[in-house]
Image (cartoon, rainbow, N blue to C red):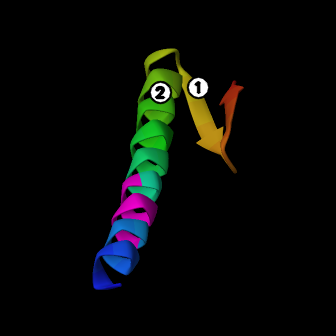
Amino acid sequence: MFGLIRTAILICVAFVGGLLFERSQAADACAGSGGVMRDGICWNE
């Protein structure tokens, strides 16, 4: 039973880590193109 709970927790942690990584990559790409990230949207000013 503990193995199932541990697996579910690890999947959730990996999912959240993937989301954070993707947001970081998007912010870097936005800054590289001269934009500014606001509320998850890249604004080119």
Please name the amino acid that badge 1 sits on. Answer: Gly
Residue farthest along the bottom direction in this orientation: 2
Decide if residue 45 is on the left or right side of residue 36. right
Please report the residue visible at 51 percent of the width from the left and 31 percent of the height from the top.
26
Residue 7, how many percent across, how many down?
35, 67
Please report the residue visible at 42 percent of the width from the left and 32 percent of the height from the top.
25
Please report the residue visible at 37 percent of the width from the left and 55 percent of the height from the top.
14
Magenta stretch encompasses residue 11: yes
Please state which of residues 3 and 16 is positioned toward the viewer in this rendering.
3
Q: Is residue 8 above or below residue 44?
A: below
Please state which of residues 26 and 12 is positioned toward the viewer in this rendering.
12
Q: Secondary structure at mark 2?
A: helix
- Disc number placed over residue 15 in the picture, else none: none
Residue 5, how many percent across, how many down?
39, 79
Please name the amino acid that badge 2 sits on. Answer: Ala
Residue farthest along the front direction in this orientation: 1
**Within-10-Å neighbours for mark 2: few <14, some 14–19, many 20+:** some
Asked if labels 2 and 1 touch by Cβ distance under 8 angstroms, the answer is: yes
The part of the image, by quadrant, that contains residue 35 is top right
Q: For the stretch drawn in magenta, what is the main secondary structure?
A: helix
In the picture, which quadrant includes the N terminus?
bottom left
Report the residue marked by disc 2: 31
Decide if residue 18 is on the left or right side of residue 26. left
Residue 6, how many percent across, how many down?
32, 75
Please report the residue visible at 42 percent of the width from the left and 46 percent of the height from the top.
18
Q: Secondary structure at mark 1?
A: strand
Please state which of residues 40 and 20 is positioned toward the viewer in this rendering.
20
Report the residue marked by disc 1: 35
Decide if residue 8 is on the left or right side of residue 6. right
In the picture, which quadrant includes the C terminus?
top right
Which span of residues is magenta-colored? Answer: 9-14
